[in-house]
Amino acid sequence: MKAVIFARVSSREQEEGHSLDAQIQRCFEYAIKRDFKVLEQFRVVESTLSQGRPEFAKLVDFIQAQKEKVALLCYSVDRLQRDFDTQYLTLQELIKKDKAEIHYVQTNFIEHKDMDSSDKFRKNLDVLLANDFRNKISDNVKRSVRKKLEEGTILGDSPVGYLNKRRMDIKKEKVEVYLDSERAPLVRQIFEEYATGMYSMAEVRLLITNAGLRSKKGHKISVSQVENILKNPFYYGYMDYKGMLYKHIHPRLITKELFDECQRVRKGRRKTGYKRTQKPFVLKGLLKCMHCGCSYSPELKKKKYVYMRPTKSQGDCLVCHHMNETKILSQIEDVLKNMSIPKHILLDIQDELKKCSDKEHKHLVSERTQLKAKMSGVDEKLKRARDLLLDLGITKDEYNEIKAELEVERQNIDVKLQSLSKADDSFNETLGIIFELASKAHELFKSSEIEEKRRIITILFPNLKMDSEKLVFTLRKPFDMFLLSQNHPNWLGWLDSNQRSRDQNPLPCRLATPQ
């Protein structure tokens, strides 16, 4: 039988070891014992968390292209998968069609078309255990990140102007960062020159390039890199991680005052965004062919008729073709006409949404009150520090350090307050959208302008596809409950047969904003 070998590690550090070679060697030994002819071997450095897993997809494509049945040799389950992802499900289809089978070398287990229930159970259990192992690794990484942030040590490589001290033992030795004697003075010069307000970022870049500043890889610094340097709080003593600032223990290159002055200059130079000149279209970027997957682009004819033209980006397709936009929109309107709720049920939903909104609002008010109390505490500490400075209880340098720490704490609290405000607005907006669209979707769509029509479509439909001239769609939850059709006789599942609310199955109080 013909075979392919798949060996995988998650990172470049593992690749530098012997893990890949060891996996391949064991798989070759297995192939020799079974008299398999190895067609190809896939050496992959890719996490099972990688979006799309492109290298694994290449393996699946290679197996699909073979005319004969192929044995996929893999050292263990966790090397191949740790979840029931799309590519793995494609591989499963090949196994069902008897075009492939998987040999796990470590356990001598073979996944094939005619497995009995106990073998299937064993296989699924192995996948779940591998997935659990992946989740534990993820938890460990998060704990490690939290610990480093609390200790004030850097995550990853330092910015331009600093160098990481080489460690002999990565696991035991802590990260040490020191000022780069060659680049640090030039990076400080970026801040000093820009703070004068006399130079743009492009002009600063030119000055500093002529002065000899290069990136760690020896390249000239770009304008975007200058901007990133000017925005990076690391240079005055803090690390930015997901919008929050954490004090670090590494040397500071500039003062907080110089950094703040640069931010004032930068914001003063910010340009107003330009208006789009392109004509808006209702279905632009929202429509694909069901068969080949290519997108449809709007095309204006005779300055008034809009046609949706398939891009044919996936190759020639006999199914998709030009179609008048109005024909597609009429099909969308037909769907919206069927979104209707009896008035007495609509009132019940309105009551449930009101309860949800009140509950969420109370939760957010409580959190906001606590954060405002913390903010007042920070302001009080700043006032006390100022009084101590005036009474000569502390030096100017000590005051500046206290002030910088308290301002960072204040900024972090402000970020959380803004986040709560957005969450409150988002929650109430989501409830309003659901209620309004569920009750009068067609009426709203007909009376809306182009941009509002687009918004309604993106809220209701996760994707729109064309099967020749027929619209194929799915509705987002909970809107799918409101679609009246013979295939959905019991569409409002949270009410019983007498149209009374079921206490054991209420409308969920936390509703995600449509994406």
Image (cartoon, rainbow, N blue to C red):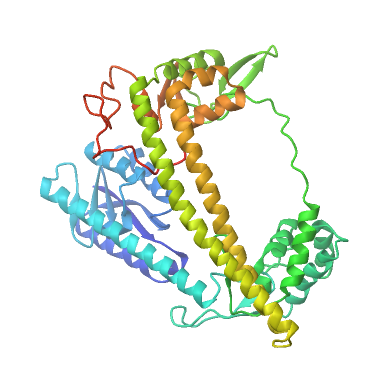
| Left or right, 100 with reference to 181 | left
Q: Nearer the viewer, residue 95 or 364?
A: 364
Residue positioned most to the right:
198
Q: Nearer the viewer, residue 332 or 177?
A: 332
| Left or right, 134 with reference to 230 | left
Percent x, y of residue 113: 18, 41
Eyeballing the image, is 294 above or below 325? below
| Left or right, 149 with reference to 478 | right
| Residue 89 in view here | yes
Eyeballing the image, is 165 above or below 355? below
Percent x, y of residue 465: 45, 25
The residue shown at (46%, 26%) is: 437
The residue shown at (48%, 18%) is: 442
Residue 278 image-quadrant placement: top right
Q: Nearer the viewer, residue 163 or 229?
A: 229
| Left or right, 19 with reference to 389 | left
The residue shown at (46%, 47%) is: 361
